[in-house]
Image (cartoon, rainbow, N blue to C red):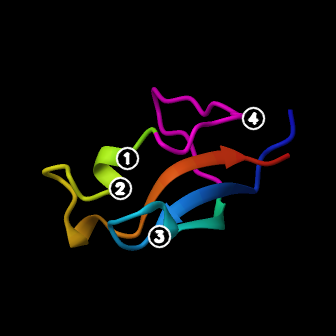
Amino acid sequence: MKAIQSIKAIQYRAYGAYAENRFVDLPAPAANDGQVLVRMHTVGINAGYTFRSGHHYAATPENLPRVGVRWGRA
């Protein structure tokens, strides 16, 4: 299987509405010992709504920018 060099991601730089989401290219992550990378072809973007909206105890400015969804590209 060909190594993935970059991934597409939905990233937000501020907490709030879906308008904060940006579609970006990021370097592909590397798996550490005991981890695996999973290639995903379809994802939902509302999975992290509580965190992205700022209604989570860990939703602090230090945790931004944050990637809510990422997937690989062949």
Whether the magenta-drawn stretch holds residue 31 is answered as yes
* Mark 2 neighbour density, 10 Å: few (under 14) some (14–19) many (20 or more): many
Numbered mark located on residue 24 in the image: none
Q: Amino acid at mark 1?
A: Tyr
Residues under labels 1 and 4: Cα distance?
20 Å
Left or right: residue 63 versus residue 38 is: left
Residues under labels 4 and 2: Cα distance?
22 Å
Q: Which residues are magenta?
A: 28-46
Q: Earlier in the sequence, mark 2 or mark 3?
A: 3
Instruction: Please tell me whether mark 2 sits on a helix, a strand or a loop.
Output: helix
Instruction: Please tell me whether mark 4 sits on a helix, a strand or a loop.
Output: loop
4 vs 2, front mark: 2
Q: Amino acid at mark 4?
A: His
Residues under labels 4 and 3: Cα distance?
23 Å
Answer yes or no: do the residues labelled 2 and 1 have beta carbons within 8 Å? yes
Q: Earlier in the sequence, mark 1 or mark 4?
A: 4
Write down the residue under mark 2. Answer: 52
Numbered mark located on residue 49 in the image: 1
Percent across and percent down for residue 56 are 19, 49
Write down the residue under mark 3. Answer: 20
Write down the residue under mark 4. Answer: 41
The answer to which of 33 and 38 lies nearer the viewer is: 38
